[in-house]
Image: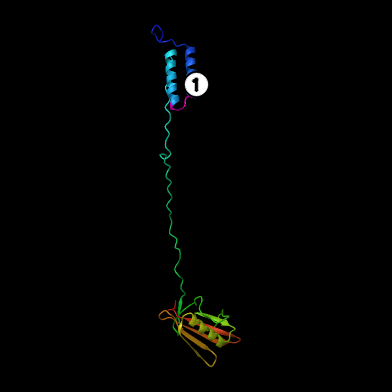
Amino acid sequence: MTASGSPPRVTARTAASCARRVRAWRVRASGAGAVVAGLVLVTALSAVTGCSAPAASPSPTAVPTSVIASPAISSPTAGGTPVATSGPSASAGTTSTDWGEIRDAVPAGFPLPPGAEPADLPDGPFSGTYTTSTPAAGAADAVRAGLIAAGYTNVGSSGTETGEIAIDATGAVAGCRVRVTVRPLGALTAVEVLYGAACP
């Protein structure tokens, strides 16, 4: 206010000076104490020069990081047909013979004489046919020992005048029986296996 009681006249120079002072205050002001000091300064300037204090811009409110939620990411549901980890065991077919029902293949690990190799022999049908250079008697002994070691029981053999030897045995499964026939075949020995259909 002037001595006469009327508000001071604000000239262009006065307004420019007021603006410069306010800008300088905004640059220097920091912290709560500076804000109070700045308000006092602006109030004094307003009383002297007639400048009105600029409206204080609201300070942005900090948002706690815990409030900011991350967008949820959903995992896609796996589709399609489940894949089987293992298929059914493929069992060999069977054939009827005068001896009985046999499987059309000999399982892996079945006891055979040393040096036995698969061979196509004319007689049959059989579960498997082989030849070996081991003489018939030695081949028969090896088959008997192998059947006993594999857990077969009632292992017995019978021979003929021609040198043919048949070894019969019973497996652990009810109804399982096998017959292995060895016979001379020139310089080799033929091995013919009848593996019962009831055997695993």
Quadrant location of the C terminus in the rendered image: bottom left
Q: Nearer the viewer, residue 21 or 182?
A: 21
From this viewpoint, is residue 17 visible? Answer: yes
From this viewpoint, is residue 125 visible? Answer: no
Q: Nearer the viewer, residue 24 or 200?
A: 24
Residue at horizontal 50 percent and vertical 87 percent from the top:
166
Q: Position of residue 125 (x, y in %)?
A: 49, 82
Residue at horizontal 47 percent and vertical 23 percent from the top:
26
Q: Which residues are magenta?
A: 28-32
**Identity of the residue furthest to the right in this view:** 187
Residue at horizontal 43 percent and vertical 15 percent from the top:
46
Q: Position of residue 5 (x, y in %)?
A: 38, 8
- How crowded pointer 1 is (Cα within 10 Å; few <14, some 14-19, many 20+) is rated as few
Circle 1: residue type: Ala
Q: Is residue 154 on the magenta stretch?
A: no
Q: Position of residue 107 (x, y in %)?
A: 49, 76
Element at label 1? helix
Q: Position of residue 114 (x, y in %)?
A: 57, 81
**Identity of the residue furthest to the front in this view:** 33
Quadrant location of the N terminus in the rendered image: top left
Asked if residue 65 is positioned above or below residue 195 in the image, the reply reads above
Asked if residue 80 is positioned above or below residue 141 in the image, the reply reads above
Residue placed under numbered mark 1 in the picture = 24
Q: Nearer the viewer, residue 157 or 160?
A: 157
Q: Write down the quadrant of residue 131 in the picture.
A: bottom right
**Identity of the residue furthest to the top in this view:** 4
